[in-house]
Image (spheres, rainbow, N blue to C red):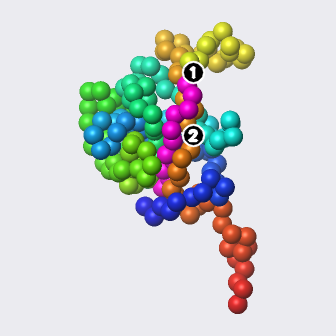
Amino acid sequence: MNRNEISIDNFVIKPFQQFDKGWFVLTSGDFSAGKFNSMTISWGSIGYIWRRPIVHVVVRPSRYTYQFMESFDTFTLCAFPKSYHDALNLIGTKSGRDSEKIRESGLTPIPSVLVTAPGYSEAELIIECRKIYWGDLDPQHFLADNIGLNYENNPYHRFYYGEILHISGEDHFQVQSQKAAEGCDDS
């Protein structure tokens, strides 16, 4: 992939489409130590809180990635072209606890720029984050009746807020200059 560094002020994403249809691969751990795990996620958000750009992700305690999110201070979110949907589906449905799912997926882990968690060479977007807050969902606080339907026979998620430290991505993830957007030529 042809990724370039993207400043937070120029970062553009369609979060509803990316989470729901495109998915992200969430990875936590330490690439250099070979201790990390990834899972595909379709729930989360991107925004701004506490004067910081953040991502918000949720992980069930039953997931293998949970122990990495608990043990390490950083994580990455990677987005991929649609052609990698099968690989993301494998990473989201198999456990790294008892399989080599990352190798089986055909994806290639690479070192990140600022965090210990790896990104993937095939990713079109890599967001590097440092955890700044976590909490556990409390069903007593659900205000909509149907939220609980997501948890029949499943543990409640732990949510994490991660401060965005670095973004690299293909050009379509950044604001183009006004002239480029309008196709203007100064000559």
Give residue 145's quadrant in the image. top right
Q: Which mark is residue 106?
A: none
Return the residue nearer the eye: 3 or 19. Answer: 3
SS type, badge 2: strand
Q: Eyeballing the image, is 4 above or below 64?
A: below
Dot label at residue 163: 2
Callout 2 crowding tier (Cα within 10 Å): few <14, some 14–19, many ≥20:
many
Which amino acid is tagged 2? Glu
State which tag comes first along the sequence, 2 or 1. 1
Q: Amino acid at mark 1?
A: Gly
Which residue is tagged 1? 135
Q: Position of residue 16 (x, y in %)?
A: 64, 41
- Write the residue at 40% across / 41% down: 117
- Which of 49 and 91 lies nearest the eye of the viewer? 49
Q: Give the spatial CA distance, label 2 vs label 1.
A: 15 Å
Which residues make up the magenta segment? 124-135
Residue 132 in magenta? yes
- Residue shown at 34% from the left, 39% from the top: 30
Query: Looking at the image, is 133 positioned above or below residue 155?
Result: below
140 vs 42, nearest the viewer = 140
Q: Tell me the element at label 1.
A: strand
The outermost residue toward the bottom is 187
